[in-house]
Amino acid sequence: MKDIELLLENAPGSLALLGETLGQNGISLEGGGVFYYEQKAIAHFLVNEPERAKSLLEEVQTNVVKINEVIIQKLRQDVPGQLGAFCRRMALAGINILVQYSDHANQLILVVDNLEKGKQVSDEWMKEWWG
């Protein structure tokens, strides 16, 4: 899965068009969100077929900014402070988290500025917390 980054108009129907276009073509949004600011909105969604999603959305004049590789991180939901501890670990490794949201399985989805280093931190975290 990958993150598709979009720039939407701040207008009624923008998100509906995105959801309808992908849904009618069998592409499910597995997590993500939209954040509006003034006349535009930045959206990030997790999809299984990012290149196909990009093509379909461009056909309906939706501005696809880029497709991002992601880190999918499982956190212990029963342990308070997991998000802060994991993000601190990334920060100490010099990794900047550019985007963060959750998927439908309550996993953390991250777009980071250094994917290889971020995956290394994630792998170490998984070994520590999940064995």
Image (cartoon, rainbow, N blue to C red):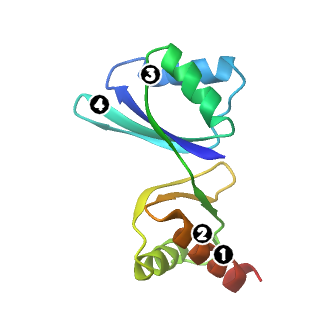
| Amino acid carrying mark 3 in the image | Thr
Which of the 4 image quarters holds residue 131?
A: bottom right
- Name the residue beneath numbered marker 1: 123
Element class at badge 4 = strand
Q: Nearer the viewer, residue 74 or 117?
A: 117
Q: Which mark is residue 62?
A: 3
- Lower sequence index among marks 2 and 3: 3
Look at the picture and state if 68 lies above or below 51.
below
Q: Contact (CB < 8 A) between labels 2 and 1?
A: yes
| Amino acid carrying mark 1 in the image | Asp
Discs 2/4, front: 2
- Name the residue beneath numbered marker 4: 40
- Name the residue beneath numbered marker 2: 119
Give coordinates of residue 27: x percent, y percent. Answer: 68, 29
- Lower sequence index among marks 2 and 4: 4
Spatial CA span between label 2 and label 1: 6 Å
Give coordinates of residue 108: x percent, y percent. Answer: 58, 60
- Residue sitting at 66 percent across and 67 percent down? 74
Spatial CA span between label 4 and label 3: 12 Å
Spatial CA span between label 1 and label 4: 36 Å
Q: Which mark is residue 29?
A: none
Horizontal side, residue 106 vs residue 18: left or right: right
- Lower sequence index among marks 4 and 3: 4
Look at the picture and state if 62 lies above or below 1.
above
